[in-house]
Amino acid sequence: MRNRFSFQLRYFLYWLLFFVGAKVLFLFYHAGKTAALPAADVLGTLGYGLRLDASAAAYLSALPLLILLLGSLLGPRLPADRLIRFYTAVMGVVMAMFTVGDLELYRAWGFRLDATPLQYLNTPAEMAASAGSAPLLLLVALFIGVLLLAWKLYSALVGRLPAVPPGFSRLRAGLADVLQLALLVVPLRGGTQQIPVNQSDVYFSTRPFANHASVNVAWNVVNSLVLQSNTPTGYDFLPAATAGQLVGQLYTPQVPLPDSASTGLLRIRRPNVLFIILESFTAKLVGSTGGEKGITPNLDSLARTGVLFTNLYAVGDRSEKGLVGLLSGYPAQPTTSIIKYPSKTEHLPHLCRHLKAAGYHSHYYYGGELAFANMKSYLLSAGYDAFTERADFPLAQQNSKWGAHDHVLFDRMLQDLPRQRRPFFVTAFTLSSHEPYDVPMKARFPGADEENRFRSSVHYTDWALGRFLRQARTQPWWDSTLVVLVADHGHALPGWEQNYQPTKFRVPLLLAGGALRAEVRGREIATIGSQTDVPPTLLAQLGLPATDYRWGHNLLHPRQRPFAFYCYNNGFGLTMTDGTVMFDNVARREIWRTTPQVTDEQVRFGKAYQQASFADFLSR
């Protein structure tokens, strides 16, 4: 029985070694790029990549182990060994095709094989032309070589399936097989962590090639197919040219533009930038933006000495959408998020990248796991110099479900910022006001109901923020620092609003810190805007170009048609000065207009923006 039970382990190890060998082949095929990596990064591609390799190996092992279970229960009536060999041969051919095809596709495209080639199946001539320059003889030889080595590895490591020994009951053998099947869940999920493995877990370097080399191609293809199956092909409400023209009109500025004296907020040319993203800080709970009083006293107090934007809207309803909106100025997608596609996010503009080119040094702080929602791949491609996340805090400080509570995060920042090279661009993302709203202090609003627990969590984060800011003001870096405070998205609470209502998406944006000019402190700006407008507004204050942020606009340069576009689950809302229209993409009809003044023209603008922005997403 020991030999039969070791079959499961040997089979899993076979696929794991196959994928490690495929990674080595990838590194050798792209020897020029590999040679440019430090030795630690070359080894890192193998070490960090093991999690996705193990996940892919577990998926491929599941069916053979199920066949093994049935073989144990049914006995010789089921040719388990022949079935497993046939399955392995078929999968071996498929995996070899993925491995070899990816070698040349990466050279041409710059990203690992995914579902993209399927877009060209209906145009075989173009597909053949694209492959015209590929070294076909070499690739065929490599394909045959991979198959031969895989067969030899299988023969040496796995071999024939041993029979159940006489006298050993089928039921006992079946129970043992069930146990081993259950154990596959661990490598399949990439470990025992809360979040299943994704590309972010193997992204470890600031060098894109090292991160790309770490990805398991088989896992990447299947993941891309799953994502693609959940993504519509587009929203064709209008002719493409018409949609483009309408979107262009939305970004037409007022004439004449305001002068720089009225729009310049800073007293120094290159301040430090401390960019704090507040989890779920809906404007409904911020008194200074017209929300409930007493929830965020520290933020409200800071607003009286800062510059407050009172009509800013989140691009979407999830953190990953808000991050891309705030840091890349890019709109949200209605049924997915671009952050799930590293091959797309690598081509987005990013504040960190632009500020680095201007001499800034960067650090990203988060008390949770950066792998959440594939954030890590997005942030690594942005070029942050350093990261602090959950694993960097002692276990005793990981005192929330998500990781380290916000006051712990801010304490770490207070320790680090005096040593941070300047000028700095430091980004921090809070987490304590995320569900389940547990806080490490007495709840400000008693009761077990979800609304009060949410209020208490927002109040706690505000307390932690105030505590941080009071200490920050005593540090030397404060006087030359611009603080940007903004939420990642709004919230249905309080009030349990419908997912499409505009008040769910309105969030605070506050500029503060010692770098502000004295005469602009206390200013409120009621211009309607979006998270996508934050990067162009910030870069304009720093005197840096923002032409790459084509979906954003400087909020201090008024538009003829101020607007904010947001996505909810397969629908959109467009807020303008006359009100908001909400539209359902599936039903292809309006849900609601908040005022009678909302016109049919506004509906067309919303359709055009949805269509054009999603077409841009598909094309990246």
Image (cartoon, grey):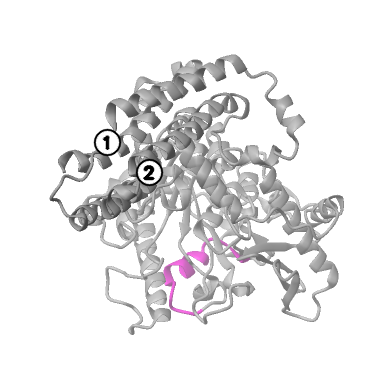
Task: Specify whether residue 305 is painted magenta.
Answer: yes
Residue ID at (33%, 83%): 446
Q: Which residues are magenta?
A: 292-312
Q: Element type at marker 2?
A: helix
Q: Is residue 461 above or below residue 260?
A: below
At a point 34% along the width and 44% down the height, the residue shown is: 80
Specify the quadrant that holds the C terminus.
top right
Q: CA distance from mark 1 to mark 2?
A: 15 Å
Rendered location of residue 311, percent (x, y): 64, 67
> Which residue corresponds to mark 1?
10
| Nearer to the camera, 523 or 161 | 161
Residue 116 placement (x, y as % from top left)? 63, 39
| Residue drawn at the location 53% of the way across and 77% of the way down | 291
* Amino acid type, label 2: Ser
Q: Position of residue 51 (x, y in %)?
A: 35, 40
Give the quadrant of residue 224: top right
Q: Secondary structure at mark 1?
A: helix
Q: Earlier in the sequence, mark 1 or mark 2?
A: 1
- Label 2, on which residue? 55
Position of residue 294 in the picture relative to residue 608 (left or right):
left
User: Residue furthest toward the front?
Assistant: 77
Q: Residue at x 69, y 62 (%)?
A: 565
Task: Write down the quadrant of residue 467 in the picture.
Answer: bottom left
Q: Is residue 369 magenta?
A: no
Check disc 2: other Cα within 10 Å, few if <14, some if 14-19, many if 20+: many
* Circle 1: residue type: Arg
